[in-house]
Structures are given as structure tokens and as C-alpha cells.
Amino acid sequence: MKKINKKNHQSGQVLLLVVMLLATVLTISLTATLRSTSETQITKLEEENQKALAAAEAAIEKVLQSKQGGNFSTIGLSDLSGIDLSQSSVTISNQQGNTFITPLLKKDEQYTFYLNNYPDFNSPWTGNLNIYLKTETNCPALELTQIRNNNSLVRNIIDPCNQITNPNNLKLLTTTGDSLGGFNFAYKLSSNLSISDSKLLIVRVLFSPTRIGFTSSSNFPLQGSTITSTAKSTAGVVKKVQLFQSYPQIPADFFVTSF
Amino acid sequence: MKDLLKKFIKKNLGKQSFFFILVILFLALLFFVRKNLPVYAQTWQFDPIGPTVYITPVCNNGGSFAPGTTSECTTDSITVNGYYQDPQSGLKNISLSISSLSGCNPKSSSFSSPYPTTLQTLSCIISRNSSTYTYNITASATDAAGNTNTPSSATSVSFIAPWYQLKNASFHKLGSPFIDLIPSSPKDYDSDTGAAVSRYLIITDTNYEPGVVTYQASSFNLGGGGSSFSLKNWSKDSYTKNSLLDFDAFLNYLKSRKSYQTINDINNIKADGIYFYNNNSNNSLNLTTVPNYKFLLLFDGTVTITGSGNKFNPSSSIAIIAQTINFAKDLNEASGIFYANQINFSSPGTSTTPLKITGNVISKNSATLSRDRANDRQKPSLFIVFDPQKYLDLLPYLSVANYDWQQLK
């Protein structure tokens, strides 16, 4: 009798164990399934992001060549799969302003700043220009070459640390700079440069990489084009990319007589 | 006996005779001294004045010395005459020495007694060579009394070295040393020189201003005596210029960002634009004339600017970018923007023809002048006129663009 009771008691334990095991397996399976679904969704979203970003960049590349904006179909990108072509477009805008900040220019690089409309050069800008300088390492120095409408050349140097031998003491004086366009500049001109009847101001960086800021009370001529591309995937992911393309820049390597 | 001698002297020789004997003895002593002591000791009290020495350089072959702080000969040889004279004790040694010149013969002469008191000369001929242009001359003479003299002032003579001049430019001089010997009295290259001739490396037109001169060397030599870099005289020594864009880098940029055409004949240029010349057969290209379009020509090899009638003056603005650009040795005018890893201003060999380049010249590596304007060295042998109009005409081609990307969403 005792034996029979013991057997029955043992069968109940096995059942309990089986139930618990099944519950555990079920929990693990459900968790794994849920995670897999979530990861799949994230991966899909990432794919959509990449697809939309790539489409937006491709549209900018296309417009860089054609110089024509519009929706993706009209600019020749009708074969992009997974992109909602009717909701994707590129615009070319010309934004003028009275502040312009260059990229960080390497030593011996130069920036061509337009003082007249390009390419006709028939609408010269007149105003008072201030120039800001900022380096990441050593002290900056700039050579300014102003090409006037009659092609004569006005040259100046900005050299706050006296790195250029300047026996005749002919240079533009600087003072402590301040914030401009989101950058803190170490130096700026003490007095504005009066500009008129000019085409270009070519600023060459000497000694150390420098970011240059130009500012005035009136809007500058256009310095380039801003291309804005918006791409929307069929899943609804939207990516927006903007590119500023400067007008032609004369490289310093081709500009300074050297041998 | 002693008494007898005293009586004899007292009787036969008076006090006057005694003094006469003393004089005889003194003269005998003097004769002895002159014959037996060293020269300088024998005569110093008789010839305290040193010899006369002076030098007269003569510019040969009809040339002349240009006025200035340093005598500059315009032709190919200089005769240096040294003149020496000592009318008192005579000359014992004379010498004429020219530094940096070993072949000057005679350099010195020595004389023995009787020492010459007439005018003596020593002459040397300095022939022009391509490395030394200035010579310091020293001369000296020693007379028989031991006095030595040199000319009252140091004498230096120079040939005018071949030199180059820029106009309206900024300039970086590669390599070391940085030498451009501007003559004391420079002349205009031609009527285009414009502003008054001055001893500037960079001259300017009216209303034009010169740029900064940077140079790789730690020092410079522009000939001294009032020469300078420019009116503003901005300069920087020991400057290493970064080369950010060479032939290969620019070609890669063009391929990815600009449209260009590949041609195998220069006459296939039919419109303004960028052209890549590829003739597949060799890596040299001679240019005599080019079509009348604004263009940028790239060639992965050596371009030789030969010109027509020794002139290469395209009607429109052009730029040539190549691995090497040679200016033919007889070429005397070229117009354009010339960029190469290596520029040769005369090829093959050196040239006596002056060269004027209007536009610009940029060599990635140091280039030598290799021209010597033999018929008028007061004018530059190489004259480079920076022309901004060419850059404006070629803006769409000879340029890059800056890009600033932003992801807004």
C-alpha cells in the first residue's frame, strides 16, 4: 500500500515538472520571437533610412551635373525602387546674406570670394567688408588679392602676429574677434575694408589652417548654389540633405607664381 | 814714448782736426751699417713713405661698367690692371690677387737690387663664367724700405648676372639658395614694363600692388645696394609651401567633377572647354599654334612650347597643365597659364634669348633660369607678367569647387 502511494505521489511531481518546463520553453520562444520581430523592424527601418539617404544624395549628384531641380522623375531618377518619386524632389536655391563663413582652409589654400555677380561680373558689390580669422593651432596670416573691374590688383596682408617681414609696415590692423555665424573668431579687422568696382577677393592662407568669416551691413553677391534634396521611401521614411556648392574656386597651386 | 805722442798731437793736430777725424769715423760707421744691417734697418730713416698702389678695371669688348655701388661689366671679360710705384727706395714685391679666380697670371712679381723706382704693372683678365659674377680684387706692394701698401679702397667688379623679374605677382621661390642678382641700373624688359624701372624683384603697373614673396631658403640675395622684393617688400624666409593639387590630383578631380573631352590632335579643339590630350604613341607634345578658344589643356607628358616665329601668343586665354613644360630655347614670348611638376625655361640646353611670359608660371619643383640675355644684360632674361584676366576667362575650367554637406533630416 505504501508502495502504491509513493508511486502516485511521484507521478504528480513529473506532471508539475513537465508543466513548468513547457511554460519555460514557451516563454523563451515567445521572447525570441518578439525580439526577432523587433530587430527585423529596426533593420527594415535602417534599410529605409539608408535607401532614402542614398536616394537624396544621388539626386544631389544628378543636379550637380544637370544644374536642374525638380522631382526625382524629371531629373532622371525614375528607376529608384522603394522611393516614393512623387514625394521626392530637389531644389536649387540662391541664398544671399551679409555673413559668409568659409570652410577651414589648409595652409597655402585660398578662397575665392565673389564681389560681383558670377559669371557676368556686371553688378559690382559696394560696401564695407570686415574679415574675421580663426585658426586651430598657430597664429593666422592672410594675403588678400582684390581683382578690380579694370583687372588692377589691390593687395593686402593680415598678419596679427607679425610673421611676415613687413619693413614698410603696410598691413591691415586687427583687433580681438568675436562670434560670427556660430564660430568664435580670434581676430577681426580693426577697420572695415571699403569695396567697390571689384570682381573677386582671393584670400590665401599662410602658416596655419584658418577659417575666415566675411561680414557686412549689406548682402553679399551670391557665393554659390544651395541644393536641397528630399527623398521619401515608400515606407514613409523621409531624408533631407543640403549641399552648398561654391562658385569656381581658383586653387592657390595655380595662382601663385612659383619655380 | 807716451809723452812724445802727446807732444806730436799737440803740435801737429789742433782741436778742429780732431773733430774732422771724428766725422770721418762716423761716416765709416754709417757705411758699415748700411752694408751689413737688414734692409728695413738700413733705410727706414730715409724712406718712410710706402709705395703707391692702385687698380683700374676695364670692361673689355666695348662694354662698360654700369654706374652703381658695384662696378658691373656689361660684356664678357674684364681686364684688371694693378699699378705700383715707389720712387724712393724702389719696389721689392708687388702682387695682384682676385678671389675666386685661380688662373690670373701673373699674380705677383719680386725684384732685387737695384729695386725699380719706375711704374710697374700687373694685369689679370677675368673671363665671364656661369657661376661667379662678382670678384673682389686686392693688390699690395712692398718697397725696399719694407713699407707695404694696398689700394686706398677695396675694389670689387661684377658681371651682370642673368636675372629675372616679375610683374604684378605674388611669388614663391623653391629651392636654395635664392639668388636673383638685380643689376645696379636695371632696364625695362620692354615697353610693357610700365612703372618706373626699379630694383624690385616684383614690379607693378600703376594701380597694381605686389604680393608676398615667400621662399624656401633661409636667406636671399637680390644683389644688395637698394634692391628689394617689391614696393611693399613683404617676404617670408624658410617657408615650405604645401602643394595641395598637382597634375595627378587635378586630373582625378576633373574626371570626377568636370566634363572634358579627350583629343589626339590639338586642332580638334572646337569650343571653349577642358581637353585631355592623349595621342597614345608618345609622351611629348609640341605646340606651335593653338585654336582660338578659351581652354584648359591637360597632357600626361612633356609639352614643349615652340611657338610660331618664336612667339606663342594664343588669341584667347589658355592654360596648360602637364607633367613637364619646356619653353623652346629660341622662344621669346609666351602667353597663357602654365602649370607643371617641372618647368624648363629653355630647352634643350641654355639660351641667350630673353623670354617674356604673360599669364603665369607655376612649377611644382624648383626651376633654374637657364637664360642669359647676352645682348643686354641690364634687362631681365626672364620676365613674367601676372595676368588676372586669364584666370577670369578660365574660371569654369581652371578651378575647383568647395562643397559643404549637411543632413537636415
Image (cartoon, rainbow, N blue to C red):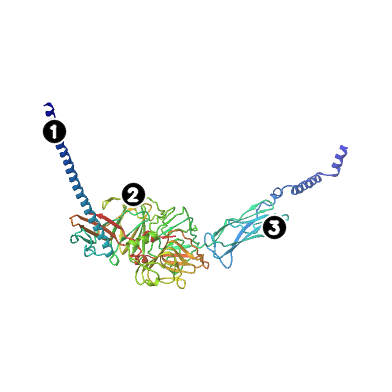
Q: Quadrant of the N terminus of chain B?
A: top right
Q: Chain of mark 2?
A: A
Counting labels gives: 3
Q: Which residue is mark 1?
A: A11
Q: Is residue B96 above or below residue B316?
A: above
Mark 3, residue position: B117
Q: Residue at x 59, y 65 (%)?
A: B60
Residue B8 on image: x %, y %: 87, 42
Mark 3 belongs to chain: B
Would residue A211 be visible to someone looking at this image? yes
Q: Quadrant of the C terminus of chain B?
A: bottom left
Please say if the residues under marks 3 and 1 sit with CB atoms less than 8 Å apart: no
Mark 1 neighbour class, 10 Å CA radius: few under 14, some 14 to 19, many 20 or more: few
Q: Position of residue B396 (x, y in %)?
A: 33, 65
Near-viewer residue (A2 or B91): A2
The reply to whether discs 3 and 2 touch (Cβ–Cβ < 8 Å) is no
Numbered badge on residue B128? none
Helix, strand or loop for disc 2: loop
